[in-house]
Amino acid sequence: MWGLRAKVNAILCVGFLSGVPVFAATPEFAAVTPNHPITLPQDSGAHAPFRTEWWYATGWLTTPDNQPLGFQITFFRSATGHDAADPSAFAPSQLIIAHAALSDPAIGHLTHDQRIARQGFGLAYAKPGNTDVKLDAWKIIRAVDGHYDVTVDANGFSLHLSLTPTQAPLVQGEHGYSRKGPRPEQASYYYSEPQLRVTGSVVRPAAAGTTSKNETTVTGAAWLDHEWSSTLLDADAVGWDWLGANLTDGSALMAFKVRGRDGHAVWAHAALRNRDGHVTTFDPGQVDFTPIRTWRSPRTNTSYPVSMTVKTGALTWQLEPLMDDQELDSRQSTGAVYWEGAVRVSRDGVALGRAYLELTGYAHALRLGKN
């Protein structure tokens, strides 16, 4: 499978959310349009006619001794443009890529792993109709009752988690049509499942000065995103800031800003669903991410704004990281280096919830090309 890496790096470039690989739009791939509402649960499965797709779960966990952990598991499906009529079982028509990470303050830095393989032979796949994605022993499967089973046995840590919905999915944008730029084709289909109740166990990495790994039961709350698209971001885009927040009163907040070369927003959007289910959306001029404090990676020398304020209309949210060192280097799979971390959410000094913040394009501008 790793023999594909050179080819993958030559044809992939980084796209929206989670360092996902996105290709230039071509006529043979399906287009995202505003007149195709998302239908669940059918749309929880794979959409092979579109060029790229990802299932992205993040969350905060609590150990029996009340210690916090953060986790991330992301599966990507990427169509390569290979002739769909090729009957060979080895035809590289779809790639499956996965990232997993654990944020453990006892370790002090992000522990992460990554995988990549061509789809086939029952070893790597993303099935249509219902979430069922697998890459070797890593998998995320949606059961009939809507809960997700996550299994990841990674290098140095493991995640064995059950994610159970406690509220309806949050369909983003206009019935799932989510703009990512000033042109209408710069869009994805996008829905979220916030406030997922988490149970299960994790194997934590060995702490400094020890050799034994630590398996522990956990509980917590998670956020799951599912997106699919066929297009690039705007040519002026260099990266983005994204937030998915589970608030303690049952509300859910999603916000993002696609940054241009001058640091200003190429596009921005936010959605806030209150505990009663009412959704308020915010247009590009109502959303902004403003750095408060930066952290510089000792490995890549990249500076990330790990402490930020996020503006959504009249509301301003403060973000503080669980720990500063949550940089993920995925150059062996998607080619991206980005910061993906657990953060606390407050407003006017009052704690309001827990979230995940993603910061891309800070290590280097995304090579998005022209479109």
Image (tube, rainbow, N blue to C red):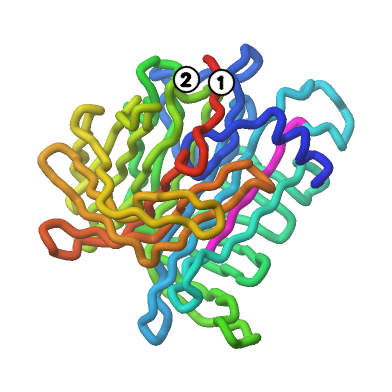
- For residue 184, which quarter of the picture? top left
Relative to 341, residue 45 above or below: above
Query: Does residue 285 show up magenta in the picture?
Result: no
Label 2 Cα neighbours within 10 Å, binned few <14 / some 14-19 / many ≥20: some
Q: Amino acid at mark 2?
A: Ala
Query: Residue at 40% of width from left, 37% of height from top?
Result: 240
Kindly tell me whether residue 197 is visible in this rendering.
no
Q: Secondary structure at mark 2?
A: loop
- Residue 367 or 71: which is nearer the viewer? 367
Can residue 33 be seen from the camera position used here? yes
Q: Which residue is identified by label 2?
A: 235
Q: Which residues are magenta?
A: 93-101
Mark toward the start of the polypeptide (1 vs 2): 2
Residue annotated with mark 1: 369
Q: Determine contact: label 1, label 2, CB under 8 Å.
A: yes
Q: Is residue 42 above or below residue 65?
A: above
